[in-house]
Image (spheres, helix red, strand yellow):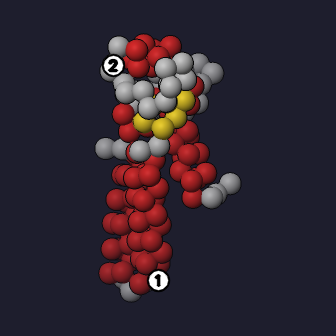
Amino acid sequence: MDPLLSLSNDWLATADTLARYGDERGAAVLRQVSSELCTALEGLATQTVSLRRAAAISDYHEDTLGRMVRDGTLTNYGKPNRPLVRVSELPRRPIARTRRGGENTAAVIRGIVTSKLGGH
């Protein structure tokens, strides 16, 4: 399961526990942030990004993603010489894996979600 969806599910489970012990206010906050996270993730699924950004998100090399666009494995939503790919269609490597000098996938996703939600 996607780590961010898992986090949302954890928040909902914690909200149920808080409600069971009488903390309706805390439960409501967790339900709200869980809902906001799911909404942000849904928007992210249709977002298109450059091959450079796609490489940071997927942990696949930019050239590999370019080959996937050329051979039709990935759909190009941009122009022939300036491809864009959907985040939801990207191949994924395990979340713990990072390229030397690359960004951790979880950190990249958190950054995108944070920027979409207006965080810092």
Indicate the quadrant where residue 100 lies. top right
Q: Residue at x 45, y 19 (%)?
A: 65
- Nearer the observer: mark 2 or 1; the answer is 2
In this rendering, is residue 109 above or below 75?
below
Q: Residue at x 36, y 80 (%)?
A: 19
Q: Nearer the viewer, residue 51 or 106?
A: 51
Residue type, numbered disc 2: Gly
Residue type, numbered disc 1: Arg
Q: Residue at x 48, y 38 (%)?
A: 48
Counting residues from the start of the chain, the first of labels 2 and 1 encountered is: 1
Q: Nearer the viewer, residue 80 or 16?
A: 80
Disc count in the image?
A: 2
Residue 73 can be seen, yes or no: yes
Q: Residues within 10 Å of mark 1 (few under 14, many from 20)?
A: few
Quadrant (top left, top right, bottom left, bottom right) of the N terminus: top left
Determine which of the numbered discs, if any, sits on residue 72 in the image.
2
Please state the horizontal and vertical placement of residue 17, each as a whole percent of the image. Answer: 34, 74
Indicate the quadrant where residue 7 lies. bottom left
Q: CA distance from mark 2 to mark 1?
A: 50 Å
Q: Residues within 10 Å of mark 2 (few under 14, many from 20)?
A: few
Kindly identify which residue carries mark 1. Answer: 25
Q: Residue at x 41, y 71 (%)?
A: 31
The secondary structure type at the circle numbered 2 is loop
Please state the horizontal and vertical placement of residue 50, each as a whole percent of the image. Answer: 54, 29
Determine which of the numbered discs, if any, sits on residue 94 in the image.
none
Q: Is residue 87 left or right of residue 99?
A: left
Residue at the limit of the structure toward the front, as seen here = 79
Circles 2, 1 touching at the beta carbon (< 8 Å): no
Q: Nearer the viewer, residue 35 or 44?
A: 44
Please state the horizontal and vertical placement of residue 37, each as a whole percent of the image. Answer: 45, 59
Residue 56 can be seen, yes or no: no
Indicate the quadrant where residue 94 lies. top left
